[in-house]
Structure formats: C-alpha cells, structure tokens
Image: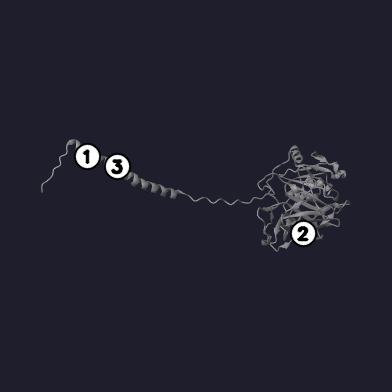
Amino acid sequence: MKKIKIHLNKKTKIILWSVLVVLLIALVVLFFVFGTGKKNLADKQEEEVKTEEPEATPEPEVPKVQIIDLDSESRNIAVMINNIRTVWGYQSGLQDAYLVYEMIVEGGYTRLMAIYKDKMPERIGSVRSARPYYLDYALENDALYIHFGGSDQALRDVRTLGIQNINFLYDSGFWRDRSLGLATEHTAFTSMENINQQVSKKGYRTTTETSPVFHYSAVEVDLSAHGTVIPANRVYIDYSGSRNTSFDYDPVNKVYYRSQNGVAHKDYITGNQYTTKNIITYQVRNYSLDSYGRQALDNIGSGKGYYITNGQAVEITWEKKSRGEKTIYRYMDGTEIELNDGNTYVEIQPLGRTLTIE
C-alpha cells in the first residue's frame, strides 16, 4: 500500500498546537465548573443542613402573684379603720388593702385594720383608735401602725413594744370630712401620700426583711388535696347580738362580696361593694377589761378554723406563739396553707358565736 505523507508547514503546525492548547484549557475550565463546582455546591448545601439548628421552644411564662410584689422590700402600713354602724357607707380605701383583720371591740362593734403594701390610695378611713390585740397583727406583719388615739393599754403597749406609729391625736397627716354630717370622731381621713410624708418626717424605717405572713399561689389552689372540702357559697360570721359579717360568692368573678348586718359594704368614693378572694376565720375567747367594755382576746395560742376561697372551705389550724411572732396557718395534713392570688379578710370571731358556711 502506498503511504501518503502529509507535509505541514511551520505555520500550520503552530495553528494546530494553538487549537489543542485552547481545547485543553476549555476542558479544564469545564471540569472545574461542572465537576468540582457541583461538588462544592453539594458540600455547601450539606454543610447548611448540618449547621441548621431547630427553632428553640419558647419557655412557658411562669405565672406571677399580682396582689403584692413578693420581691418588694417596702414595709407594710397598717391603718385602724372605723367600723361603727354610723360610718357604713362612708368608709374608703379598704379595697386597696391586700389584708384586712376584723375583730370585736367594746359595745359589740367590730373594728378593721387594713394593711397596705405599695399602694397609694388617696382616701383611707375613717381612722380610729388603737386596741392592744390589733398591735399583735401589726407586729407580725412588721407594719407601721396608723391610728387616732387609743385605749390606755394600747397606748402603753405601743410605747413598751417599740411600735413605730403615727397617732393623729398628736401628728399631722389627716383631714376631717365634715361634709358627711357625722360626729367629729368619725370624720378623720388620711391618704398614703400623707402617711409617707409623716413616716419621712419621723425617720421611720421604710423597708422590711420580713416575708409576708401568708404564702401566695399564682395558680388556683386545690383545697381537696389538703382535706375534706365543704361548699362555701355563703359565709355568715356573728360577732355579737348587734353585729355580723357575711360574704356571698360570685362564681363568675371568683370573689366574695362583703356585707355587714345584711347590708352591702360599699366604698364611699367608688360606690362599689367590697370584695375579697380569701377568707380566714377562727374563734378565740374574749372578755372585758374595764367598765367601758374594752376587750381582750386570747389570741396567743392555737386552735382550729377555716380557709375559704373559690366557693369552697377546708378546715385548718392556727398557732401564734407570742405577740410578735407570725401566726402560722396549716391545713389539717400539717402543711402551711397557700392563699389564692387576691386580697384576704382575717375574721377573728368571739368563741361560741355562730359561724355558718354553706
């Protein structure tokens, strides 16, 4: 076979080599674009998948007690409130108190001691005189004590017990509302602003390291977990032949409406009937101290009572070891009670008087 020889001149060879070089460069570029490029993209996507973290589940909001700030170091303010029948309908500021004590005084009447914390009611009263056993509850609440005069023993106790107090018999910070048409002794009113001014003037301590007397729960308390529950849609507490207090439960708002001798107990300024979330009631022996019928109570000791809330009641025990020590309230299983978030009335009733829970 005859061989065919192709003779390429120098110029043609250069052109062919140039074409080959270009083709090689193109192949290399294509390799990196469509080969390693895809790999890098895949790696990047894989990396993103690996580093992508699941969305964090938000922490559930922890319920917080609203009736008082449990972290507050503000000192309690205890104010003696007139509760003679003449002033019913003219009282002011009780709804702002987170804790109210009611006890018997002379004449078969009762008197109230309202305890405030971090609230600024503009009208409180009418303010009345001190009685010795109310001091025991001012002490256990580490409260500044606001009153207008007092019995001889109460005033002696204020001095000997070293209770920081404002006595409107001598101190300023109150006004008389003579427009009410009441006897002068029933017309003294104050405000938290006025009280704070007097506290500052006297240089009294305004903070406390004492925890509240009661424990509070931000979630509804299950009374059935602590004893036998009885219905408590109406509570009737008899103090004397002429004085009784009653509470009627509102299941919609989950509060009790307060009445005295069957009459709705209302605030003079707002016109609203006073309400409460919790009721503590127990009985102690009472007796007269003097010819005026001023009372003494055997409130240092122990006994049984009831914790009432949300239309239910459960039996409890109470124990107070001394005038200044806190009263400890326990369920019958021995654990300390927790109050539902809201205000509280402590009704300390004379021994043997009628108590109806139904």
Q: Residues within 10 Å of mark 1 (few under 14, many from 20)?
A: few
Q: Along the polypeptide, which appears first: circle 2 or circle 1?
A: 1
Q: Is residue 110 left or right of residue 9?
A: right
Kindly report the distance in space between the C-alpha atoms of the residues bearing marks 1 and 3.
Answer: 15 Å
Q: Which mark is residue 173?
A: none
The percent coordinates of residue 32 (x first, y second) are 33, 44
Instruction: Count all numbered tags in the image, as a single digit.
Output: 3
Q: Which residue is depicted at the point 83% across and 43% down?
A: 188
Taking the view exactly as shown, the residue that stands out farthest to the right is 291
Q: Which residue is depicted at the point 36% across and 45% down?
A: 37
| Helix, strand or loop at mark 3 | helix
- The residue mark sitting in front, 3 or 2, is 3
Label 2 is placed on what type of residue?
Answer: Arg
- Whether tag 2 and tag 1 are in contact, CB under 8 A, the answer is no
Label 1 is placed on what type of residue?
Answer: Leu
The percent coordinates of residue 211 (x first, y second) are 68, 49
Residue that numbered label 2 is attached to: 234
Quadrant containing the C terminus in the rendered view: bottom right
Q: Along the polypeptide, which appears first: circle 1 or circle 3?
A: 1
Residue that numbered label 1 is attached to: 16
| Helix, strand or loop at mark 1 | helix
Residue 9 appears in the picture as rendered? yes
Residue that numbered label 3 is attached to: 26
Image-quadrant location for residue 310: bottom right
The percent coordinates of residue 2 (x first, y second) are 10, 47
Q: Is residue 144 left or right of residue 59?
A: right
